[in-house]
Each structure stands twice: as C-alpha cells, then as structure tokens.
Image: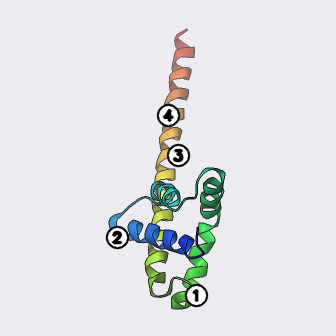
C-alpha cells in the first residue's frame, strides 16, 4: 500500500458518507480490501480508526483548511460529526428499547408471582 493510499481511502470513505449517506463502518472494510489490506492488519486499522475518530473531529476543526485534507476538511468534519450523532441516536434508541423490555419483563414477573 502506497503512502497516499490511506489518505485516499479516508477521503473516499468520508466523501461517500457525506455525499450519499454511506455507512463508514460498512464501506471502510471494502475500501481496505480493494487496497490490499486484509486480515489482522485491516482489523487493527479499522479498530484504530474507530478509537481515534472522536479526537479527529476536534483536531480537524482546529486545523481548518491547514489540515491534511485541505479544502475538504469541513466536509470531513461534517461527515464525522454526523456519523457520531447518528451512532449516538441509535445507541440511545437501543438502550431505551432494552430498558422498556426490562421493565415489561419485571412487570410480567411481578404479576406472575402474585397469581401463583
């Protein structure tokens, strides 16, 4: 993989997220495979990306047009922020659903213990 390949992959992934509402977590493994990165290397790279993406938003905002993404920085920041907002919304929705299921289960258990 050439030195510019990671930047190209990142740019193409972020552009797809921004322009066509693609999911970076689904697109990134495909892009890495096309670039010849697979197996444990791809897994480590994807995990590193997930773990550091939150700090990247603040760093890119601070760098502005002087970041490695140049004029595409704002689009990258918007795509990352939108992705994190979507992930947070879905996480909250799933958490609420599990809380409701737990409450319903507790109520049913309480009800069945009174009957028996």
- Counting residues from the N terminus, which is met first, the one under dot 2 or under dot 1? 2
Q: What residue is disc 3 on? A: 95
Question: Mark 2 Cα within 10 Å, few/some/many (few <14, many 20+)?
Answer: few
Tags 1 and 3 in contact by the CB under 8 Å rule?
no
| Distance from the alpha carbon under mark 4 to that under mark 2 | 36 Å
| Distance from the alpha carbon under mark 3 to that under mark 2 | 29 Å
Q: Looking at the rendering, in which quadrant would you find the C terminus?
A: top right
Q: Position of residue 90 (x, y in %)?
A: 46, 52
Q: What residue is disc 4 on? A: 101
The furthest residue to the bottom: 66
Q: Nearer the viewer, mark 1 or mark 3?
A: 1
Local SS, label 2: helix
Local SS, label 3: helix
Q: Relative to 61, does residue 26 appear above or below in the rendering?
A: above
Q: What residue is disc 1 on? A: 63
| Distance from the alpha carbon under mark 1 to that under mark 4 | 45 Å
Q: What residue is disc 2 on? A: 19
Q: Residue at x 48, y 59 (%)?
A: 34
Q: Relative to 98, does residue 22 appear above or below in the rendering?
A: below
Q: Position of residue 111 (x, y in %)?
A: 51, 19
- Counting residues from the N terminus, which is met first, the one under dot 4 or under dot 2? 2
| Distance from the alpha carbon under mark 1 to that under mark 3 | 35 Å
- Counting residues from the N terminus, which is met first, the one under dot 1 or under dot 4? 1
Question: Mark 3 Cα within 10 Å, few/some/many (few <14, many 20+)?
Answer: few
């Amino acid at each position: 993989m050439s030195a510019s390949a990671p930047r190209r992959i990142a740019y193409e992934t972020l552009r797809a997220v921004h322009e066509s509402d693609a999911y970076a977590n689904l697109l990134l493994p495909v892009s890495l495979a096309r670039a010849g990165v697979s197996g444990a290397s791809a897994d480590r790279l994807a995990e590193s990306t997930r773990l550091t993406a939150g700090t990247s938003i603040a760093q890119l905002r601070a760098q502005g047009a002087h970041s490695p993404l140049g004029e595409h920085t704002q689009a990258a920041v918007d795509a990352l922020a939108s992705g994190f907002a979507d992930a947070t919304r879905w996480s909250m929705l799933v958490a609420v659903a599990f809380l409701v299921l737990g409450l319903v289960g507790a109520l049913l258990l309480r009800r069945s213990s009174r009957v028996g």
